[in-house]
Image: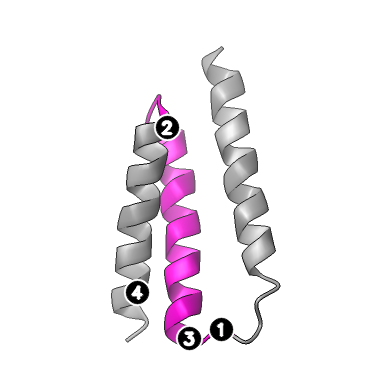
Amino acid sequence: MKSIQRISALAIVLATVMSLSACDNMTRRQRDTAIGAGIGAAAGAAIGDNALSTIGGAAAGGLIGNQIGK
């Protein structure tokens, strides 16, 4: 059951990242924020056992990506 949840979470993250790649008119900061959120969500899903870790990873990754994109 846990493997199905991880695969589902990874599929959602992958679909989100792929959909964001279509936004070519983003600023560098927006792009870095989106990439950071995607990577953080994937890391949170791989490490944690619940959706809260995925959301927390996405939030932390987005924040880090936003600050790097300055």
Residue type (three-letter) at the residue carrying disc 4: Asn
User: Foreground mark, 2 or 3?
Assistant: 2
In 3D space, how far apart are the residues under numbered discs 1 and 2 (Cα atoms)? 28 Å
Q: Do the residues labelled 3 and 1 touch (CB within 8 Å)?
A: yes
- Which quadrant holds the C terminus? bottom left
**12 versus 7 height, above or below:** below
Residue drawn at x 36%, y 47% as measured from the top left: 57
Display colour scheme: one colour
Residue type (three-letter) at the residue carrying disc 1: Met
Secondary structure at numbered mark 4 = helix
Q: Which mark is residue 66?
A: 4
Secondary structure at numbered mark 2 = helix
Q: Residue 15 carries which label?
A: none
Residue at mark 2? 51
Earlier residue among tags 1 and 4? 1
Q: Residue furthest top?
A: 1
In 3D space, how far apart are the residues under numbered discs 3 and 1 (Cα atoms)? 6 Å
In 3D space, how far apart are the residues under numbered discs 2 and 3 (Cα atoms)? 28 Å
Residues drawn in magenta = 26-50
Residue type (three-letter) at the residue carrying disc 3: Arg
Residue at mark 3? 28
**Magenta includes 44?**
yes
Residue drawn at x 42%, y 32% as measured from the top left: 51
